[in-house]
Image: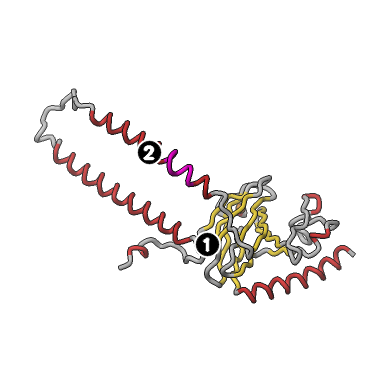
Amino acid sequence: MNLMNLLPLPELASAHGYKIDFIIYVVHGLMFALFVGWALFILYVLFRFHRRRHPKASYHGIHTHWSTGLEVFIAIFEVALLVGLSIPFWSSHVDAAPNRTDTVELRVVGEQFAWNVHYPGADGVFGKTDIIHIDQQSNPLGIDPNDPHGKDDITSPNLHLPIGRPAYIHLTSKDVIHCFSLPVMRVKQDVIPGMSIPVWFTPTKTGEFEIACAQLCGLGHYKMRAGLIIHSDEDFQSWLDEQAAASAVEYDDFFN
Ligand SMILES: [Cu+2]
């Protein structure tokens, strides 16, 4: 039996995900060892200090101080791990965005209770957005109609990505705190109004998956889900072309 199949983890579809899974297994393994160790210890104590062996309670207890020394040592060891290892490791990796030219860059904006995906279009530049331009039906992202960079932008209620290229996503929210969760990508990041927070990952499987909101954000939280569609490179390009053609028509209707 493969030990790695003991936990019911979701399907894995990203390049970095196996590292997250590894940590999950290591943590579960350590917690199991701790559980077994403490269970054995309590059995030993029940036997060792049974009433028949010690009919009279000792009100003095132990007289040595080695356990105090041990506790101090453990506390110092843990602070050293945190300050010397974990914090430097985290700070050197937290901003390590993929340094590649084939990155797909986009924005995802959460709202009660939907996701809006914003692609920069053919020019590769996001159009300006402002809350005053938001129209829930025709312009949910509030793209500025006077900004030429916005003319070719594409918006979608679902997240479409190509396989094998790093997706670099700027996350923000229109209203309250949401959480952008892609279980199959092992990606989960809080989405905070007023902040733009980047996440990145590389899909390794084509198919249709799910985006969920992992932060209780209101009455409709349960229905705040959307599709995550991973295409082959050619399919992704043709999807983009289709969307570009469709939104060009929409813009003509709307602004002329
Ligand atoms: Cu939400």
Query: Residue 241 versus residue 214: which sits nearer the camera?
Result: 241
Question: Identity of the amino acid at label 1?
Answer: Met
Q: Where is residue 31 shown, x and y percent of the image?
A: 33, 49
Q: Earlier in the sequence, mark 1 or mark 2?
A: 2
Q: Which residues are magenta?
A: 82-89
Q: CA distance from mark 1 to mark 2?
A: 31 Å
Query: Residue 226 versus residue 191: which sits nearer the camera?
Result: 191
Quarter assignment of residue 26: bottom left
Query: Can residue 27 be found in the magenta stretch?
Result: no
Q: Residue at x 37, y 38 (%)?
A: 78
Question: From the viewer's perspective, is the residue at label 1 or at label 2 nearer?
Answer: 2
Q: Residue at x 59, y 66 (%)?
A: 165
- Secondary structure at badge 2 equals helix
Tag 1 residue: 185
For label 1, the crowd category at 10 Å Cα-Cα, with few meaning under 14, some 14 to 19 and many 20 or more, is many
Up the image or down, 61 lies above or below 207; here it is above
> Which SS does the magenta portion mostly show?
helix
Q: Residue furthest right?
A: 256
Q: Residue at x 68, y 48 (%)?
A: 175
Q: Which mark is residue 78?
A: 2
Question: Identity of the amino acid at label 2?
Answer: Glu
Q: Where is residue 56 shown, x and y percent of the image?
A: 12, 27
Q: Is residue 136 left or right of residue 39?
A: right
Q: Residue at x 9, y 34 (%)?
A: 53
Q: Is residue 222 left or right of residue 1?
A: right
Q: Where is residue 124 shown, x and y percent of the image?
A: 73, 62
